[in-house]
Amino acid sequence: MNRQIINALIISGILGGITYLIRLNKLGERIQYRLLKVSRNKSTTLQSSSITAEIELINPTNTSLDVQSVSGFIFYGNQVLGSMESKKPFTITPGSSRLSLNFSVDNQSLLTSIVQYVLRQDQMQKIVVRYNLKTTLGVIPQSFEVNPRSLI
């Protein structure tokens, strides 16, 4: 009899854990974002500067999601202009939460992109920001576009 009770408790625990993980995974897929502000910061050295993107994360559920870290890249066309990584954990609460992404930008890559644009004199491409929210369940990818003129 004890063996049957133990097996039933183990099975219940496993099913409960699976249900919890499925609910958190669905929460990760439902999180939306709204870009609040993008700003170019003054150069810290000749080689690098930074771009900050202020984002509002919108959680339409009643469940919180713990994020372990955030990492991402800024692209202009196929060229990587900058990157960021934050290992500071935070929680996305029900409703809205703010997130600040601070990207280190390689000034040489930025200058190369500007020169290529001037030489080609074609349509200016959008800047694409791709970032990943790392959770215990896995990675939630997000991306958005920025008009390059807003950073001039």
Image: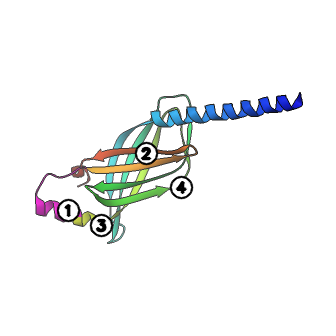
Mark 1 surroundings: few (<14), some (14-19) or many (≥20) residues within 10 A: few
As shown in the figure, which amino acid type bears the numbered disc 4?
Answer: Lys
Identify which residue is drawn at 11% across, 60% down: 120
Q: Does dot 3 land on a helix, a strand or a loop?
A: helix
As shown in the figure, which amino acid type bears the numbered disc 3?
Answer: Asn
Tell me residue 99's x, y (percent): 45, 45
Q: Which residue is mark 2?
A: 141
Q: Which residue is mark 3?
A: 107
Viewed as shown, does residue 26 lie left or right of 120?
Answer: right
Residue 125 inside the magenta-drawn segment: yes
Q: Which residue is mark 1?
A: 114
Residue range in magenta is: 113-126
As shown in the figure, which amino acid type bears the numbered disc 2?
Answer: Pro
Q: CA distance from mark 4 to mark 3?
A: 24 Å
The tag on residue 87 is 4
Q: Nearer the viewer, residue 41 or 89?
A: 89
Sequence-wise, the earlier of marks 1 and 2 is 1
